């Protein structure tokens, strides 16, 4: 890069699962120009990408129509099994673009539920990925809890002690620190704890590399949607290391943010397109000259 004071993380921007989902959605429309192509919920947490898909004729819907025709895409976060049935019953063809790593978490949760474990999901309760994992586990058990802190898990303590066997899975974009916190607590109250660390490799590498970059930076800039779990976690982790700002795009940058920063590190969430990252770098170069 021309400016030695700006370093971009290698693991910044689209991960494999997101790239696959976006490219497949576009290809589906290209191959089926006369068919309706819908996505149930935002394919990824990025407004620019959603708008681009809309312009191609790929519509984001938030409710399944009673009757319809065409294709309905399940986004990378996955969906509850009943959602697949509802789409089919509405007369739409289902195309499942759930990230393969998310699928693995769902399968692990199902295995635990089938084997009579109390299932603990380390994640955000209202996140679509977590809601889908929970729905899959609940096909086989009603003993499911979601938490990222000990306080959130505390109400289940008596149930867990009674059940004795606890199985843990993790939202793919969670922080390792949250997993460790929950596991340490469970080890004090449960007789048996079986842990599946299902944080995806891309997330783990992104967080590790960003930490290293933060050690040599006066300022870290995290680029990506405020709705994106992996992006907000990146910002949380880096705030402990150095001055950090989380922006959605270059429009949120100003000279005040960049003031006195001699070395700037940049990373981006898994749903941030390369064009947005490039715009941020260009804006920094303009403002620093």
Image (spheres, rainbow, N blue to C red):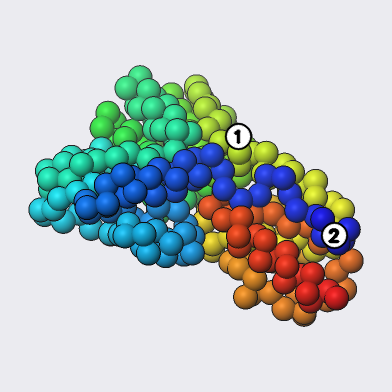
Against 15, is 201 above or below? above
Estimate the spatial distance between the alpha carbons at disc 2 and disc 1, rounded to whole Å.
Answer: 30 Å
Is residue 38 found left or right of 107 in the rendered image? Answer: left
Residue 127, image x, y percentages: 42, 52
Q: Quadrant of residue 205?
A: top right
Q: Residues within 10 Å of mark 1 (few under 14, many from 20)?
A: few
Q: Residues within 10 Å of mark 2 (few under 14, many from 20)?
A: few
* Residue occupying the point 54% across, 63% down: 226
Q: Secondary structure at mark 2?
A: loop
On residue 2, the disc is 2
Which residue is identified by label 1? Answer: 201
* Residue occupying the point 20% across, 41% down: 93
Quadrant assignment for the C terminus:
bottom right
Residue 182 visible in the snapshot: no
Quadrant assignment for the N terminus:
bottom right
Residue 59, image x, y percentages: 30, 59
Q: Quadrant of residue 200?
A: top right
Q: Residue at the top extreme?
A: 115
């Amino acid at each position: 890069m021309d400016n030695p004071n700006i370093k971009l993380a290698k693991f910044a921007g689209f991960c494999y699962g997101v790239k696959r989902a976006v490219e497949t959605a576009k290809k589906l429309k290209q191959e089926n120009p006369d068919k309706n192509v819908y996505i149930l919920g935002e394919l990824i947490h990025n407004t620019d990408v959603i708008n681009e898909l809309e312009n191609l004729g790929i519509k984001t819907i938030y409710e399944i129509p009673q009757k319809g025709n065409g294709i309905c895409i399940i986004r990378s976060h996955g969906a509850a099994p009943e959602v697949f049935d509802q789409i089919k019953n509405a007369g739409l063809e289902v195309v499942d673009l759930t990230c393969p790593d998310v699928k693995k978490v769902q399968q692990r949760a199902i295995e635990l539920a089938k084997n009579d474990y109390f299932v603990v999901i380390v994640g955000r309760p209202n996140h679509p990925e977590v809601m889908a994992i929970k729905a899959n586990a609940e096909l086989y058990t009603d003993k499911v809890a979601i938490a990222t802190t000990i306080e959130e898990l505390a109400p289940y303590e008596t149930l867990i002690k009674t059940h004795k066997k606890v199985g843990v899975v993790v939202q793919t974009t969670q922080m390792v620190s949250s997993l460790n916190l929950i596991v340490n607590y469970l080890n004090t109250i449960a007789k048996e704890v079986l842990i599946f660390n299902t944080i995806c490799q891309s997330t783990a590498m992104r967080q590790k590399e960003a930490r290293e970059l933060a050690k040599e930076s006066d300022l870290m800039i995290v680029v990506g949607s405020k709705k994106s779990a992996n992006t907000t976690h990146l910002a949380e982790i880096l705030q402990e290391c150095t001055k950090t700002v989380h922006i959605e795009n270059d429009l949120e940058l100003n000279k005040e943010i960049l003031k006195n920063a001699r070395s700037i590190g940049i990373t981006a969430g898994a749903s941030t397109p390369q064009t947005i990252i490039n715009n941020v770098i260009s804006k920094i170069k303009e403002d620093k000259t």
